Amino acid sequence: MKLLTIPSAAVIVVALSFAGATSHAQSASAVAKVNGKEIPQSRADFVVKTNVAQGQPDTPDLRSRVREVLIRNEILTQEAVKKGLDKTPEFVNQMELNRQEALVNAYIQDFIKGNAIGDDAVKAEYDRARSQAGDKEYKARHILVKDENEAKQIIAQLKKGGSFEKIAAQKSEDPGSKDKGGDLDWAPGGRYVPAFSDALKKLKKGQLTDTAVQTQFGWHVIKLDDERAMKFPPLEEVKGQILQGLQRQQIDKLLTDLRGKAKIE
């Protein structure tokens, strides 16, 4: 919500002139009055709170800028209403979408508050991820094909001295690695599907799988370039990320449950 985006110079001048002409009659609960209509202080406080949540300090300068933006918006809003733009189908639909989005966000925030995730749950998820990752990282390459016989032919070519990188670029069906010679970069074994991970962990540095490895993606020819000790970040460093991940799981389950109860025709 970038409510403090600087408007054009012309709009600034108009907003400031209106503010100077109408600020003398406002009530204590209003931040300003524009053409007789008050802008409530609560609205300014909400905008300030939003910007502070995004990292800006609550200063007199911030509050002054918020006031000017609200005055500008009120001026333009009044002009739009005079032209009947608030009655157009496009505006009505946009307002309903905005209303729904605000209510969705409010509902989810209320749900998160009422279903707080404790430190024990975060620690348990951290331990699970750490255990799954293992104590090593692997720098692997692979060539992915759809057919087992083709994978066998590729293994035979490689054992005769064929270039893994060239064959990967020519034949691999993995768009993320084929142009890099099949390079998957450094990753813990737990990042891969079980069959791939199990085969990878059995390899020694520089070794190639003797047989193709089947997964739901196809048939893999795997080569281990290198391995090293896993450097897992401390809990405090990733605690926020883990908490967000657990909250996403909660919300996904909530949505699944609510959709299951809803009558959709």
Image (spheres, helix red, strand yellow):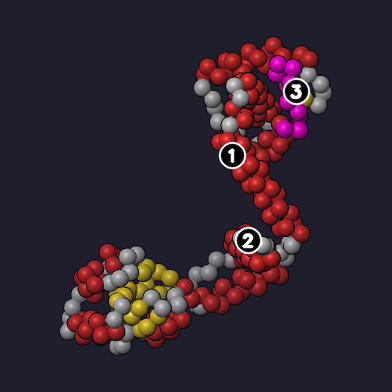
Residue lying farthest to the bottom in this orientation: 210
Label 3–label 1 contact, CB within 8 A: no
Q: Secondary structure at mark 3?
A: strand
In the image, residue 2 above or below residue 116:
above
Q: Which residue is mark 3?
A: 38
Residue type highlighted by circle 3: Glu
Q: Residue at x 53, y 17 (%)?
A: 10
The residue range painted magenta reads: 32-43
Q: Residues within 10 Å of mark 1 (few under 14, many from 20)?
A: few
Quarter residue 7 falls in: top right
Residue type highlighted by circle 2: Ile
Q: Residue at x 32, y 65 (%)?
A: 175
Quarter residue 167 falls in: bottom left
Q: Residue at x 68, y 35 (%)?
A: 48
In the image, residue 139 above or below residue 52:
below
In the image, residue 130 above or below residue 23:
below
Give the quarter of the figure containing the N terminus.
top right
Q: Which mark is residue 264?
A: 2
Q: Residues within 10 Å of mark 3 (few under 14, many from 20)?
A: some
Q: Position of residue 17 (x, y in %)?
A: 63, 13
Q: Which residue is mark 1?
A: 94
Q: Earlier in the sequence, mark 3 or mark 1?
A: 3
In the image, residue 59 above or below residue 175:
above
Residue type highlighted by circle 1: Gln
Q: Position of residue 264 (x, y in %)?
A: 63, 61
Q: CA distance from mark 1 to mark 2?
A: 23 Å
